[in-house]
Each structure stands twice: as C-alpha cells, then as structure tokens.
Image (tube, rainbow, N blue to C red):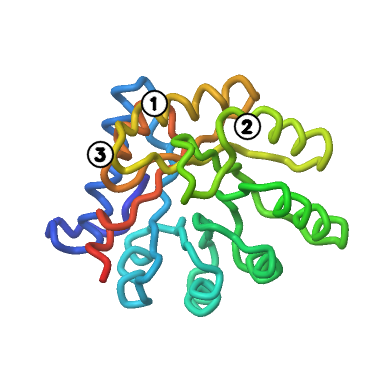
Amino acid sequence: MPMTSTDTNPRTPAARLAAIRARIATAAKDAGRRAEDVVLVAVSKTFEEDAILPLLDAGQRVFGENRVQEAARKWPPLRERYGDIELHLIGPLQTNKLADALELFDVFHTLDREKLAEALVKARDKGTVLPRLFVQINTGEEPQKAGIAPGAADDFLRRCRDEWALDIEGLMCIPPTEEEPALHFALLEKIARRNGLVKLSMGMSGDFETAVRLGATHVRVGSALFGTRD
C-alpha cells in the first residue's frame, strides 16, 4: 500500500493513513495473508473536501459514503481532479435513489432485500452496467438494522445467482455494538465460504484488525482516519 507522503506527524491525515495501513499489514501478516489483499475503504461520510483532499494527496483512492445525495454533491468535482477514485456505497439504499447511485458508485455493499435486487435487474435490462455487489447480512438479526438474516442468506444468494443472474462479489456485515465482533466476522466468513464467495466487507475503526485476521478483504475505516464526527 504505497504512500506518496513522508509526513510522520501523528496528527496529520497522511500519518493517520500510514498508521492504519501499517496496522492492516501487521494483522494480515499475523493471519498469513498479504496486506495488498485487504482494501482500505476510507469512510468519508459527513466530511467535506478539506478533510478528504489530504488523504487523496497521500495516495488513498477508495472511499465509502452512506448517502447518495451527499456523495452526489461531493464526489463529481473530486473525480475530475483525481480520475482513479473508487467510490463505495456502504449505507442503505432506497430504490428511488437507485438511478443516482448507479451513476456515482463503483461498488454497493448493501444489497439487502428482494426489492432492491429486482430493481437492479430492471436497470441492467435497460442497459445499465451494474456496480460490483456485496450482500449485507444482518448477523445479529437486529430489527432496526438492514440486511438478510443469516438463516435466509443461502436462499437469497441462490436467488441472486439463479433467478436474478446477479454477480455477487461478497458479503458485508455490521456487528451489534454490544457484542464481540469476532463472532459475527466468523459467521460472515462461514456463510461466504459455503456459498463460494471470497470477498468480505467487515471491520470498522474499532475492530478492523480483528476483521483482517478473520478474512476481511475490505475494511471500512472512518473515525480513525478523519477524526470524530460532529
């Protein structure tokens, strides 16, 4: 994960980025994995251009946003300046925002229901090239949280493959805040493995090293890079 800055002040964005990348590399090595097989998704939701630009200048190119409207305001001008940006949607997606999301994002992490799958199929049938797709699994079966229940995951993934012909790249989860995240990461990896999937979007600022050790291919890190949100 190359850096384009030699800044070592721990309070600067470039130094925080370097520190996060080093921690990912250490966790990957501990698990017998390669650091380059783990994608760092810098979660820039609620942060504006002045906070994002230092990370872009330091070499970070993969970013995550929660809201389509916010991303539509922030990212088109940044993409004009940095053409190799990869933008990931990591928040819930309403079907009435799908057309806008398809224009903005390279990866969706939150395919979480039949209605959204069918809307993606309709868009594809009209000629739209779909983004790379992750299915969100509600590993804690929390009623307030989106995602497919673990017990329904195999059937939903089968329908994605056989009924809708959607190319699913991997799975995503957000563990309950009060529970040990490793249990949820292990469950997600188990569901992925039995369904022939190798990509796992799991782990955030407080637990991404655990996620890497348990097989994460994408970690979604926000506050550890950008600082505390208002």
Point out the tag, 2 or 1, that comes first from the N-terminus: 2
Residue under numbered circle 3 = 23
Between circles 2 and 1, the one closer to the viewer is 2
Q: Amino acid at mark 3?
A: Arg
Name the foreground residue: 176 vs 193: 176
Above or below 145: residue 95: below
Image quadrant holding the C terminus, namely bottom left
Front position among marks 3 and 1: 1
The Cα–Cα distance between marks 3 and 1, rounded to whole angstroms, is 14 Å
SS label for mark 2:
helix
Q: Position of residue 224 (x, y in %)?
A: 25, 54
Q: Position of residue 152 (x, y in %)?
A: 64, 31
Q: Is residue 96 above or below residue 120?
A: below
Q: Residue at x 22, y 55 (%)?
A: 16
Q: Residue 47: which quarter of the image?
A: bottom left
- Mark 1 is on which residue type? Leu
Instruction: Identify which residue is drawn at 61% across, 67% down.
Output: 104
Using the rendered view, name the quadrant where residue 105 is placed.
bottom right
* Residue ID for mark 2: 153
Left or right relative to 9: residue 95: right
Q: Which residue is mark 1?
A: 214
In this rendering, is residue 46 above or below 158?
Answer: below
- Is mark 2 in CB contact (under 8 Å) with mark 3? no
Q: Residue furthest front?
A: 143
